[in-house]
Amino acid sequence: MTGKNQHVVQRENGWAVKGAGNSRDTSHHSTQAEAAEAARGIARNQNSEVFIHGRNGRIRERDSYGNDPFPPKG
């Protein structure tokens, strides 16, 4: 069973980790890098994905820590 995908999003005074579908942020951080590391830890535990959003709100990076249906070869 996979958990909720984690999103790293900008907030007024820093960056936040928010689980997909959650109404509240999971955690708040002063830098995007700190938030991304926290989101990766959660995603590893839940076998889910991390979506890192840029300042413009668009997804700029995506990492999967779940069971990929088509893992790359080699």
Image (cartoon, helix red, strand yellow):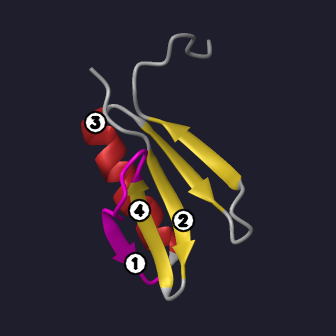
Distance from the alpha carbon under mark 2 to that under mark 4: 7 Å
Q: Is residue 53 left or right of residue 33?
A: right
Contact? badges 4 and 1 (CB < 8 Å):
yes
Label 4 CA crowd tier, 10 Å (few <14, some 14–19, many 20+) = many
Q: Earlier in the sequence, mark 1 or mark 3?
A: 1
Distance from the alpha carbon under mark 2 to that under mark 3: 19 Å
Tell me which segment is drawn in magenta. Answer: 19-30
Above or below residue 65? Residue 41 is below
Q: Earlier in the sequence, mark 2 or mark 1?
A: 2
Can you tell which mark lies on residue 9?
2
Which circle, 2 or 3, is nearer the viewer?
Answer: 2
Query: SS for tag 1?
Result: strand
Q: In the image, what residue occupies the spot 41% across and 45% down? A: 21
* Magenta stretch: includes residue 56: no
Contact? badges 2 and 1 (CB < 8 Å):
no
Q: Is residue 72 left or right of residue 17?
A: right
Can you tell which mark lies on residue 46?
3
Distance from the alpha carbon under mark 2 to that under mark 1: 10 Å
Q: Position of residue 14 (x, y in %)?
A: 49, 83
Q: Amino acid at mark 2?
A: Val
Q: Earlier in the sequence, mark 4 or mark 1?
A: 4
Q: Earlier in the sequence, mark 2 or mark 4?
A: 2
Q: Position of residue 61 (x, y in %)?
A: 65, 49
Contact? badges 4 and 3 (CB < 8 Å):
no
Q: In the image, what residue occupies the spot 32% across and 69% down? A: 27
Contact? badges 2 and 4 (CB < 8 Å):
no
